[in-house]
Image: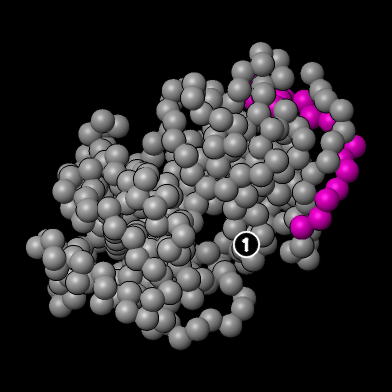
């Protein structure tokens, strides 16, 4: 079983993405499947993983498409790995779907949504269930009940933010406060946000604190879905740390004088404030049977651990069943 040569997006050893015509054909082994890719999910990791020492492979992690043999519509996410086999890249015409992490697309979900679901959803679930240690009884995960607890999701219009709003609503958080550009406010309310705030407003911290006070509740849970201005993998000059999104979001929380009461997580390690735990999809991938960390140069591994990215404890993970559905980040064909 093979396929005709196709076109792919290649991440080079210079960190640049380029289009490449492939002559290699792929033959699946074991329970893996050859898939004709219809959509692939676009993620910051497509380029940023170069800064972790990962390159020289077909880019892309998330995909949706048709399994060649049986014709099922499937979606999933392949593992990160330095110089991984070309067959595992999502941004190409054909790819190999690894058995541990592809699933049948449920009825009612389109290819374009399925291709952008796995990475963001697993990242959010890692944050809520592992970093913040909330429970989800329906999935067999023990922990405190989040029902009726306010949560602030900074960066609600990002791929992770969209997933965070929907998952926060599903597990019972409320009210759900989020930040975004005004043109995105209604769309975010439609998927579960209770109240949206303009992230560019100079009074945003005061506005959010005021809104929380009006509810008579305490805001102790925060999820930073963007980490603007404090990205340890961004080589560009950063603004003052005090102006970064993790600092602004944390400042919105109640009980500033009792930091042990706060539950804070972010999608990237915050080196200057370790009180924010790092959530990431790599831990979920490991629990599905892949490497704990990408098999890359020792410098990459050292830089990850030095930035607080290595997990210090075992974690729970939710694997999508054959009938689970949802929506997430961006996807392109």
Say left or right for 218 vs 59.
left
| Quadrant, the C terminus | top right
Instruction: Confirm whether residue 302 shows in the render.
Output: yes
Residue under the image location 49 percent in, 76 percent down: 229
Toward the top, the furthest residue is: 70
x and y, in percent, of residue 106 in the image: 49, 23
Query: Which of these two is toward me, 164 or 263?
Result: 164
Residue of label 1: 48
Residue under the image location 48 percent in, 36 percent down: 288
Is 330 situated above or below 211?
above
Say left or right for 249 vs 77.
left
Say left or right for 4 vs 31.
right
Q: Residues within 10 Å of mark 1 (few under 14, many from 20)?
A: some
x and y, in percent, of residue 201 in the image: 38, 76
Answer whether residue 235 is magenta in the image.
no
Asked where in the image residue 31 lies, by quadrant, the reply is top right
Q: Secondary structure at mark 1?
A: helix
Residue under the image location 26 percent in, 57 percent down: 151
Residue under the image location 37 percent in, 44 percent down: 191
x and y, in percent, of residue 164 in the image: 38, 50
Residue range (magenta): 17-35
| Quadrant, the N terminus | top right
């Amino acid at each position: 079983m093979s396929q005709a040569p196709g076109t792919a997006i290649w991440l080079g050893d210079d960190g640049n993405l380029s289009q490449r015509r492939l002559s290699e054909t792929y033959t699946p082994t074991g329970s893996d499947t050859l898939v004709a890719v219809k959509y692939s999910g676009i993620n910051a990791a497509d380029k940023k993983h170069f800064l972790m020492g990962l390159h020289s492979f077909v880019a892309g992690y998330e995909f949706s498409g048709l399994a060649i043999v049986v014709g099922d519509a499937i979606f999933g996410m392949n593992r990160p790995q330095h110089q991984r086999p070309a067959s595992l890249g999502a941004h190409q015409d054909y790819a190999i779907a690894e058995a541990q992490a592809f699933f049948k697309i449920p009825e009612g979900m389109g290819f374009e949504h399925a291709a952008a679901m796995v990475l963001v959803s697993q990242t959010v679930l890692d944050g809520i269930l592992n970093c913040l240690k909330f429970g989800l009884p329906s999935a067999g995960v023990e922990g405190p009940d989040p029902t009726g607890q306010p949560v602030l999701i900074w960066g609600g219009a990002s791929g992770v933010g969209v997933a965070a709003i929907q998952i926060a609503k599903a597990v019972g958080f409320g009210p759900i406060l989020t930040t975004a550009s005004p043109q995105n406010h209604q769309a975010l309310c439609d998927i579960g946000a209770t109240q949206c705030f303009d992230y560019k407003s100079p009074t945003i911290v005061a506005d959010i604190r005021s809104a929380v006070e009006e509810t008579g509740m305490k805001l102790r849970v925060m999820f930073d879905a963007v980490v603007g201005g404090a990205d340890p993998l961004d080589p560009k000059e950063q603004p003052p740390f005090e102006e970064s999104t993790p600092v602004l979001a944390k400042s919105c929380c109640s009980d500033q004088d009792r930091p042990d009461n706060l539950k804070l997580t972010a999608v990237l390690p915050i080196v200057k404030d370790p009180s924010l735990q790092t959530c990431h999809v790599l831990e979920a991938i490991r629990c599905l049977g892949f490497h704990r960390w990408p098999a890359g140069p020792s410098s990459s591994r050292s830089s990850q651990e030095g930035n607080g990215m290595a997990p210090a404890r075992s974690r729970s993970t939710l694997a999508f069943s054959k009938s689970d559905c949802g929506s997430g980040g961006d996807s392109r064909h």
